[in-house]
Amino acid sequence: MKINIIGGGPAGLYFAILMKKADPAHQITVYERNGPDDTFGWGVVFSGKTLANLRAADTESHAEITRAFAAWDNVDVVHRDEKISIHGNSFSGISRLQLLKILQRRCEQLGVELQFRTEVPDVDSLRPSCDLLVAADGVNSTARKQYSNHFIPSLDVRPNRYIWYGTNKLFHGLTLTFRENEAGVFAAHSYKFNKTTSTFIIESDPKTWDTAGFSVLSDDETRGYLEKVFAKDLDGQPLLSNNSKWINFLLVKNQNWFFENVVMIGDALHTAHFSIGSGTKLALEDAIALFECFGRTASVAAALTEFEAARKPVIEEYQAAAYESMRWFENARQYLNLSPVELAHSLMMRSGRVSHEDLKRRDPEFIARYEADHESPAGTAGAQPA
Ligand SMILES: Cc1cc2nc3c(=O)[nH]c(=O)nc-3n(C[C@H](O)[C@H](O)[C@H](O)COP(=O)(O)OP(=O)(O)OC[C@H]3O[C@@H](n4cnc5c(N)ncnc54)[C@H](O)[C@@H]3O)c2cc1C
């Protein structure tokens, strides 16, 4: 089979690896507009379950990924200068650049053709010459735009803004920090992803963002402002920018996932708010799901039909949980009247996927503290916002 893939991000590279490994006779080309080292972003997060999926799909790249990663089992919530740790959550982080280098090397080893610095402005130019065209071209997908009549996307620009930084302050565990100043409320999502660096994403609601005057601040002034907001958390370490800019989260869904021989995977197809796990996990798991469909049939039409039928309910469930989590952060201001332990409890249950009982099993000490702190612990509703 001849396969063209647009986008050398995690989704495109991983799908190329799995298909080429299964049948070296496939001719697979990945077209990537950037060079092999020009990437954005800092660390990406995987749950224990995602790592098990990666091990089952390709032991070689899994071994390299796990050699390079940082693992933890705690979520830390910082509110009113107090840190509450909740244990029993297995996660790990790896640098996005390192992950891409591992996947690029694996592609080269298997004989996938990687064409870097090659922009694909017109998807139709690649489509007729291949059996399958995979659009793994990210959140601003050219293919999604070009075939929007067929895919029927829904694009929801969310009100909160966020900015991705790195820092050399090491956060051992997924740390959610809330800080208030005269402008309003800021939330930081941070975690260590190698021996020297942590991801540090800052989120702000529109009222806070406007009051702080970010629209007229330069990149350096913005960074300086946010270093002051999180001064107690950063221990004097600067925020590291990788051309970091404020962005609004874009919630992407598509009614149809394929059109003739073109299929989308990863961020091109769907996004889920970063507070529930990384888009990288979904991108890699899409690649596995699509590959598995080709394992069951050689017909492109049948494989794409099965991919959409099998994977769509999984993604819809994930996006529904991510939506609740995103809404929690959009309304974070209303929760800050809660005590640190109540806030931590509400945060842990925000997506609706973790119950009070689940938390009790994972970290009985935390729940005992919550129940002692909170007069009416019963059940799953959690503490209520103002
Ligand atoms: C600014 C920013 C920072 C981020 N940082 C992090 C982070 O630190 N951690 C994390 O977990 N997630 C991060 N994310 C989210 C994460 O990048 C995605 O969820 C994940 O990478 C999705 O994988 P993908 O392969 O679907 O898409 P991507 O990783 O976006 O890959 C798509 C690739 O396609 C290429 N491409 C697009 N259009 C074309 C074209 N027409 N021709 C040729 N090539 C093309 C792009 O250059 C890109 O390399 C970040 C997102 C943004 C926007």
Image (cartoon, grey):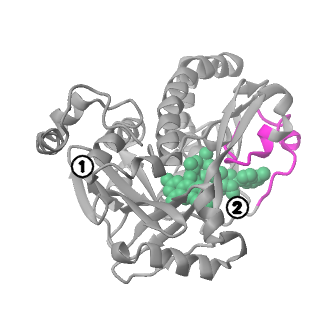
The N terminus is located in which quarter?
A: top right
Q: Is residue 247 above or below residue 262?
A: below
Q: Are marks 1 and 2 in contact (CB under 8 Å)?
A: no
Give the mark toward the camera: 1 or 2.
1
Whole-percent x, y for residue 53 in the image: 38, 36
The C terminus is located in which quarter?
A: top left
Of helix, strand and loop, which one carries label 1? helix
Q: Image check: 200 left or right of 108?
A: left
Amino acid type, label 2: Phe
Measuring 33% from the left and 54% from the top, which residue is drawn there?
66
Badge 2 residue CB within 8 Å of ligand 1: no
Q: Is residue 125 magenta?
A: yes
Q: Which residue is mark 1?
A: 341
Q: Image check: 271 left or right of 201?
A: right
Whole-percent x, y for residue 82 in the image: 25, 62
Q: How dense is the environment of label 1, judged by Cα within 10 Å: few (below 14), some, or many (20 and up)?
A: many
Q: Is residue 230 magenta?
A: no
Whether residue 20 is visible: yes
- Determine which quarter of the picture holds residue 38: bottom right
Q: Image check: 7 left or right of 337?
A: right
Whether residue 8 is visible: no
Measuring 81% from the left and 51% from the top, which residue is drawn there?
120
Whole-percent x, y for residue 280 in the image: 51, 47
Q: Which residue is mark 2?
A: 116
Badge 1 residue CB within 8 Å of ligand 1: no
Q: Main secondary structure of the magenta part?
A: loop
Region rendered in magenta? 118-144
Amino acid type, label 1: Val
Whole-percent x, y for residue 383 in the image: 31, 38
Measuring 78% from the left and 28% from the top, which residue is drawn there?
152
